[in-house]
Amino acid sequence: MMLHIGIIGTGWFSKVHADLLQETEDVKIQAILGTSLEKAQAMAVKYEANPYEDLHTMLEQEKLDAVYICVPPMAHGEIEFALIERGIPFFVEKPLAVDLELPMQIEAAIREKGLLTAVGYHFRYQENAEKLKQALAGQTIGMASGCWNGGMPGVAWWRDLEGSGGQFIEQTTHIVDLLRYVAGEVSEVQAMYAGRSMHKLHEGVTVPDVGTVNLKLQNGAVANIMNTCILPEGVAGRSGLTFYTAEGIWEWNPEQLTISTAEGEQTIAGENNPYQRENEAFLHALRTGDRSLIRSDYQDALRTQAVTVAALQSARYGDRLFISEPTD
C-alpha cells in the first residue's frame, strides 16, 4: 500500500521528515506547501512532489493519506481544522501553538472525529529515555532538575513572544515533555523569567532570554527546569534532565544516560535515531490502525502545552498555577 504524504512547511524540520519519508518503502511525498510558491518549488524538486502555496488548493487537488505539519507556533489553527474536516491524519511538530485555548479547540475536534495524530516529541523515542522511564518506574523520585541552554535562533518569529511563545514553550517543551513521560503529570507551576541581554543586542526581541520554572508533580516529586538563549555563537549549549532518588542519580541528555549508584557508575549511549522511530510509529498506525507505537499524540501533547503555557502566565503575573486536565 503506497502512502501519499503532504508536507506543510519548508524549514529544517520539514526536510528532516521528508528525507526519512523518501527513504521509506511505499511512501510518496505527494505535495509540499510553502508560504510562497517559490519556497515550495525549491523543496519539491528534491522529492519530486507537487508544490503549493495555498492550503485549500492542495487539499482539493491531492488525495493525501496523511500530512506533516512543520510550521512556526503562531501558524497553527487553520491547517489543523482543515485536515480534521477532511478526516486526514496528521503528524505535527511541537509546540502545538503559542497558547492553550487554540490547541484545546483542535483537540476537541480531533477527539470528536477519532482522528489519528502524532506529535514530534522525539526524545520519547530514544532508547536511553525508554530505559530511564523503566528504571524510574519502581523508584520514589525525590526531585528532578532540567535545562535547555543555548543561543538565540536567528529567525524573527522566534524572537517575538507573540510568534513563538518564548523559549520555554518553543524549545524547553521537550524537557517538560520528557519529565512527564518518565516521571508523571505536573500539578503545580511557578516561574520567573527575565530579559537580560538579547534585547540590547538584537532588534525585535520580546522573548525573555533567561527563565527558571519550579514544578510539582502529582506524585509529590518536585522539579526545576531552567533555560536561557543568551549563549554566544561558538559556545556549546546543554540540554538534559537529572533525577535524584534514594537509589542514586539518573542523568539524561540526548547523547547518553549516566546512572550513579552506590555500586558505581554506568553510561548508556543514545544509539538510535528518534526521528526515524517516531516516523515509523506514525506510518505503522496509518497502515494498520494500531496506534500503540505512537508515544505522543495530540491529546497527550496538550498536557505538555498546558504546563509550558502555565509557566509563561506564572512569570507574567507572579502566580503559582495549578494544572488541571486541559480537556476538562
Image (tube, grey):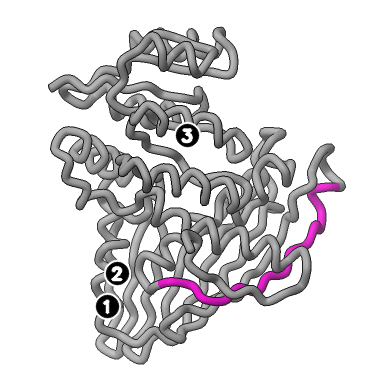
Secondary element type, mark 3: helix
* Residues tagged 2 and 1 counted as in contact (Cβ below 8 A): yes
Specify the amino acid type for callout 3: Glu
Task: Read off the residue under disc 2.
Answer: 133
Amino acid type, label 2: Lys
| Magenta region includes residue 193 | yes
In which quadrant of the rendered view does residue 289 lie?
top left
Mark number, residue 137: 1
Q: CA distance from mark 3 to mark 2?
A: 31 Å
Q: Residues within 10 Å of mark 2 (few under 14, many from 20)?
A: some
Magenta range is: 185-199
Query: Which residue position holds label 3?
Result: 80
Q: Residues within 10 Å of mark 1 (few under 14, many from 20)?
A: few
Can you give x and y, in whole percent of width and height, for residue 322 in the image? 59, 75
How far apart in space, not on screen, are marks 2 and 1 (Cα)?
Answer: 6 Å
Residue 265 among those drawn in magenta: no
Amino acid under label 1? Ala
Q: Residue at x 43, y 43 (%)?
A: 109
Q: Is residue 20 depicted above or below 205 in this figure? A: above
Q: Is residue 248 above or below residue 307?
A: below
Residue drawn 41% across the image and 62% down it: 178
